[in-house]
Image: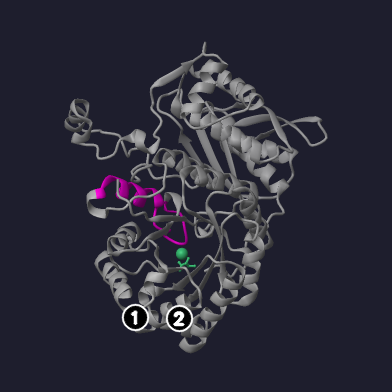
Amino acid sequence: MPEEKVMIFDTTLRDGEQSAGIGLTTPEKLEISRQLDRLGVDIIEAGFAASSPGDFEAVQNIAHEVRRPIIASLARCVLPDVDAAWNAIKDAERPRIHVFISSSDVQIMHQLRSDPESVLSAAVASVERAKEYCDDVEFSPMDATRTDIEYLYGMLEAVINAGATTVNIADTVGYTIPAEFYNRIQLIKENVPNIDKAVLSVHCHNDLGMSVANSLAAVTAGARQVEGCINGLGERAGNAALEEIIMAIETRPDLFNVGTNIDTRQIYRTSRLVSDITGFPVQPNKAVVGANAFRHASGIHQDGVLKERNTFEIMDPRSVGWPSNELVLGKLSGRAGLRSRLEELGYSLDQDELNETFEAFKDLADKKREVSDADLVALMSVRRRRVDVPAVYKLEHVQVSCGSHEIPTATVRIIGPDGNATTDAATGTGPVDAVYKAINRIIDVPNTLTEFRVNAVTEGIDALGDVTIRVEADENAYLGRGSDTDIIVASAKAYMNALNRLVAAGNGHAGTDDPSP
Ligand code: KIV
Ligand code: ZN
């Protein structure tokens, strides 16, 4: 077991949330933070407190509730940002202020319309201000991989002298390649005289598909903090996928000779939760967490794995918490069996939650007869959606008639906020269109459907269908998710979920003056 550790800095809630189309509510961010805590990340970047009241509130809530990891808030190198960051995290058990400023000529000249000397002074002044509040201060030169190296050395030396305890070399535009990045990290270690007084961190974007490789090259060169997002979420092509970095370090101790504080068995669950909450699917061939990551199609490979797993498998799927597709429970299983299986999958429920989940499980077992771990994970994610989005309107009934010579017609019954049921019907171009039009006749909230996706949660004709939609209203996007063995019902549930979010909205989506990096 290597003694030296690499700190894992998760920025799913900050850089990840900057992915186009993601807008998380505070309860959703809290739920992801709790899971990141279980995963064992060292630092959670909870948001960018000065960017909006919604972000401030989320950072503050996470700082209050999630006590083990360091909780960081991002801030530009302007004093009011630093003050806002501190106000949001000051109740954290282990607060960190993370300040950043552009360091490359192109960004200093054209984006900041400033000059290198002024930028250096702003960087030092902000680190000094942050240091007045808290010991743990991180500084990031933005676009560090396109920054003049001599300027970078001077800047790093100055901010460390001003009190920065972590310096983070950001490949903001995903420009570098592993050999070059390795070299830059080595040069920084050799030419910044006080570099041993700070943790050297890296933050890589994936524009050329090299963010994970670049991060790992930096680890071999001596970086001891790596930043990234679950499932590789993030601006543009995303940030480095943390689960890939972690599993590379775990799988090749012979190369990296460092460890992490991560409980790798929480990786799959974390990935699922983030995908579920953001509505960003994980591609099937994605390393570590994609549906095919541990699936062997070729006969030769299957034969090898059956004889000896490591012939074709470099990681044990159980080591990342992969649920088996073995059929674990059925129609006759009781509450105790359900509870114990869910506990093995990492879910602990109180009696009320168990009773509620048991009802849903019985419904599913009636339809499917046999229920696998993957079905249980899907059930839990459906339950979470119900808890997170208050169901102002409830779908009580949906019925569709359609076929090759029929005009698709849907009837729906919905319970409104006053508790009264309303029934209405509509025709459409297809069954889903008919259902959505019928719902619109009852819940009159103007919106545009911009995304509609159906996935099978498990294999087989009796699979649970998972529908993800996005609707837009008032320039905001609202996610809707619904699962059922009947995909029309799942589609109706997804639409109701999105409409309920829309109705309950009022929480901050960043506007055009959003200062996010
Ligand atoms: O990509 C970037 O440069 C950033 C910084 C704020 C670290 O996200
Ligand atoms: Zn970034």
* 355, above or below 297, in the image: above
Q: Nearer the viewer, mark 2 or mark 1?
A: 2
Q: Amino acid at mark 1?
A: Ile
Residue stretch in magenta = 232-253
Corner quadrant of residue 130: bottom right
Query: Residue at coordinates 39% horizontally, 76% vertically from top-left?
Result: 194
Relative to residue 55, is residue 65 depicted above or below? above
Residue 513 x/y as whole percent? 62, 71
Which is more N-terminal, label 1 or label 2?
A: 1
Image coords of residue 492 (percent x, y):
61, 34
Residue at image mark 1? 149
Q: Residue at x 38, y 27 (%)?
A: 324
**Residue labelled with disc 2:** 158
Left or right of 159, for residue 308:
left
Numbered disc 2: secondary structure: helix
The image position of residue 121, as x and y in percent, is 52, 85
Asked whether residue 422 is in view, the answer is yes
SS assignment at label 1: helix
79 part of magenta stretch: no
Left or right of 144? Residue 54 is right
* Residue 422 falls in image quadrant: top right
Residue 239 belongs to magenta span: yes
Residue drawn 81% across and 30% down? 420
Image position, residue 69 (x, y; %) = 52, 51
Q: Is mark 1 within 8 Å of ligand 1?
A: no
Identify residue type, mark 2.
Answer: Ala
On residue 212, the disc is none
Q: Nearer the viewer, residue 334 or 427?
A: 334
